[in-house]
Image (cartoon, rainbow, N blue to C red):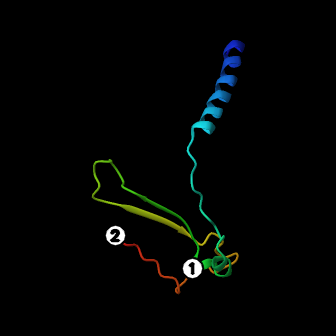
């Protein structure tokens, strides 16, 4: 790679990084162990929920739900989800 080309790539990468930061939209983050009752019983902590249609956008016949729970399993709570907590997903 020539010195001139290398001298152009670095500023270009910096500009692209700045643009990606400025032009990106804010995202909501998960709230791992933030609620007071969840700190007492980590088995009830729901972290992230993802819902999407797999495959082509035109095929909406299937829906996938992925949910992560209990971020500190084995550290501040057992490794199983609470039997006292019921999750209802209306559809």
Left-right relation of 35 to 88: right
Tell me what residue is drawn at x 71 percent, y 17 percent.
7
Q: Quadrant of residue 20?
A: top right
Residue bearing mark 1: 80
Tell me what residue is drawn at x 55 percent, y 79 percent.
81
Query: What secondary structure is marked by label 1?
Result: loop
Residue 46 percent location from the top left of the image: 55, 71
State whether residue 88 is above or below residue 13. Answer: below
Q: Is residue 17 visible?
A: yes
The disc at residue 91 is 2
Tell me what residue is drawn at x 57 percent, y 78 percent.
44
Q: Is residue 79 visible?
A: no
Q: Earlier in the sequence, mark 2 or mark 1?
A: 1
Residue closest to the far bottom: 84
Residue 88 percent location from the top left of the image: 42, 77
Residue 25 percent location from the top left of the image: 55, 44
Alpha carbon distance from label 2 to label 1: 26 Å
**Do the residues under discs 2 and 1 have CB atoms within 8 angstroms?**
no
Quarter of the image containing the N terminus? top right
Residue 15 percent location from the top left of the image: 65, 27
Query: What secondary structure is marked by label 2?
Result: loop
Q: Nearer the viewer, residue 73 or 63?
A: 63
Tell me what residue is drawn at x 36 percent, y 55 percent.
53
Q: Nearer the viewer, residue 20 or 68?
A: 20
Task: Please identify, in this view, whether the residue under mark 2 or under mark 1 is nearer the observer.
Answer: 2
Left-right relation of 62 to 71: left
Mark 1 residue crowding within 10 angstroms, few (<14) / some (14–19) / many (20+): few
Left-right relation of 80 to 3: left
Quarter of the image containing the C terminus? bottom left
The disc at residue 89 is none
Mark 2 residue crowding within 10 angstroms, few (<14) / some (14–19) / many (20+): few
Q: Quadrant of residue 36?
A: bottom right
């Amino acid at each position: 790679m020539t010195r001139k080309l290398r001298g152009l790539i670095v500023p270009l990468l910096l500009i692209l990084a700045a643009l990606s930061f400025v032009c990106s939209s804010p995202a909501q983050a998960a709230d791992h162990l933030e609620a007071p009752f969840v700190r007492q019983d980590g088995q009830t902590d729901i972290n992230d929920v993802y819902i999407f249609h797999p495959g082509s956008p035109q095929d909406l016949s299937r829906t996938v739900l992925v949910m992560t729970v209990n971020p500190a399993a084995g550290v501040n709570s057992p490794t199983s989800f609470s039997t006292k907590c019921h999750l209802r997903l209306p559809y």
